[in-house]
Image: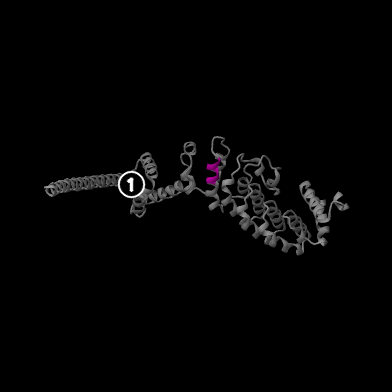
């Protein structure tokens, strides 16, 4: 009797468990069907949206052949705002048999690329609505003139100027010497400020100073170390020191072999001021240079880089010669180097 009761209880229990499993399986199947239906619905919606966007873009491209100048301008702006999604269709239009459509599509592609690179603030685009057009198709002088104007506007952010300078210097072969130096002297208060002195007699750059420094443009400013004009190379070295551009050391050190004496001297000093201890071996090679100014400044720089043991005593006279230079800063550096190399009792230090 007890066995029968236990059996019935067991069977009842198994029946309940089976029913629970069936309910779970049916629920899961229903959920899968619902999700699949939902996914299909979303996929169809996405396709419809994509199809609608495609139709919209193609419609805009057709308007590029419009005779209405205002309509073409608006169409161009709309396509630029659509940006990357419009590029595949614009690339097709750039091969169009209609010369007008072809050239406009090519121009818009350039504008989209410039927009992607610069990402200028709304403030800049509000002040100069045609800025992307100028930066995409203008001459280097056009680009500089616009950037120069923006740099003097107190409402324009520093980062915008840095981006524009980078864009100019990427292909800045058409810039004049003065234009390059104005970029390099950004943030200097006057022509007489430290490394920003313009030593070239035909320069008028001191008349046009950008108040805001542009350290964010350093990766592009470094390119001016290879400029054909040695005055530009000298100014670039001073600017990189002013921005404490230690990431430029590997390029700066190459100018130790420059053909122009002043550039070599600027380079030695720049490496010392940047505390570029990784260049000690290159600077020490100059201790035997045929030019006494090179030898003297190489010795001073090594002493400032805590490597006085590399400087032979026979170079004391070369360092003493620098005590006669017009620059107070140079005289002080030479005097300090002599103190470290010869000791405080060296009478020559009192010159």
Q: Nearer the viewer, residue 117 or 202?
A: 117
Farthest residue, direction top: 155
| Crowding at mark 1 (Cα within 10 Å: few <14, some 14-19, many 20+) | many
Query: Is 184 situated left or right of 92 in this image?
Result: right
Residue 351 appears anywhere in the view: no
Spot occupied by residue 289 in the image (x, y as percentages of width and height):
75, 63
Across and down, in percent, residue 13 comes to 17, 46
Q: Measuring 62% from the left and 52% from the top, which residue is drawn there?
A: 246
Q: In this orientation, does residue 42 appear?
A: yes
Q: Nearer the viewer, residue 141 or 214?
A: 214
Q: Position of residue 201 (x, y in %)?
A: 71, 48
Please give the range of residues in magenta.
Answer: 158-164
Which element carries disc 1, helix, strand or loop?
helix
| Percent coordinates x, y for residue 108 in the rendering | 40, 48
Picture quadrant where residue 342 is located? bottom right
**84 displayed left or right of 124:** left
Kindly identify which residue carries mark 1.
Answer: 61
Main SS category, magenta section:
helix
On whether residue 255 falls in the magenta region, the answer is no
In this view, 270 is above or below 49: below
């Amino acid at each position: 009797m007890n066995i029968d009761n236990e059996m019935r209880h067991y069977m009842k229990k198994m029946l309940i468990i089976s029913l629970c499993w069936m309910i779970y399986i049916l629920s899961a199947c229903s959920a899968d069907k619902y999700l699949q239906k939902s996914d299909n619905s979303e996929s169809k919606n996405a396709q419809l949206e994509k199809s609608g966007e495609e139709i919209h873009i193609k419609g805009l491209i057709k308007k590029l052949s419009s005779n209405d100048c205002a309509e073409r301008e608006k169409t161009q702006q709309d396509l630029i705002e659509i940006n990357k999604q419009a590029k595949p269709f614009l690339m097709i239009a750039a091969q169009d048999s209609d010369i007008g459509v072809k050239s406009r599509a090519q121009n818009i592609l350039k504008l989209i690329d410039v927009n992607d690179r610069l990402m200028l603030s709304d403030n800049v685009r509000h002040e100069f609505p045609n800025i992307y057009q100028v930066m995409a198709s203008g001459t280097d002088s056009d680009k500089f003139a616009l950037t120069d104007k923006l740099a003097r506007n107190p409402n324009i952010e520093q980062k915008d100027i840095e981006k524009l300078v980078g864009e100019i210097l990427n292909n800045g072969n058409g810039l004049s010497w003065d234009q390059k130096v104005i970029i390099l002297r950004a943030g200097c208060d006057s022509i007489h400020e430290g490394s920003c002195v313009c030593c070239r007699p035909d320069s008028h750059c001191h008349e046009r100073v950008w108040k805001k420094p542009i350290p964010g443009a350093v990766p592009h400013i470094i390119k001016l170390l290879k400029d054909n004009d040695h005055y530009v190379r000298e100014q670039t070295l001073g600017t990189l020191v002013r921005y404490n551009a230690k990431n430029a050391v590997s390029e700066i050190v190459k100018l130790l072999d420059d053909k122009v004496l002043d550039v070599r001297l600027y380079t030695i000093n720049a490496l010392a001021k940047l505390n570029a201890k990784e260049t000690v071996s290159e600077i020490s090679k100059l201790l035997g240079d045929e030019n006494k100014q090179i030898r003297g400044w190489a010795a001073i720089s090594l002493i400032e880089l805590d490597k006085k043991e590399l400087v032979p005593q026979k170079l004391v006279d070369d360092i003493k010669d620098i005590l006669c230079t017009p620059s107070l800063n140079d005289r002080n550096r030479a005097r300090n180097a002599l103190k470290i190399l010869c000791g405080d009792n060296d009478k020559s230090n009192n010159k």
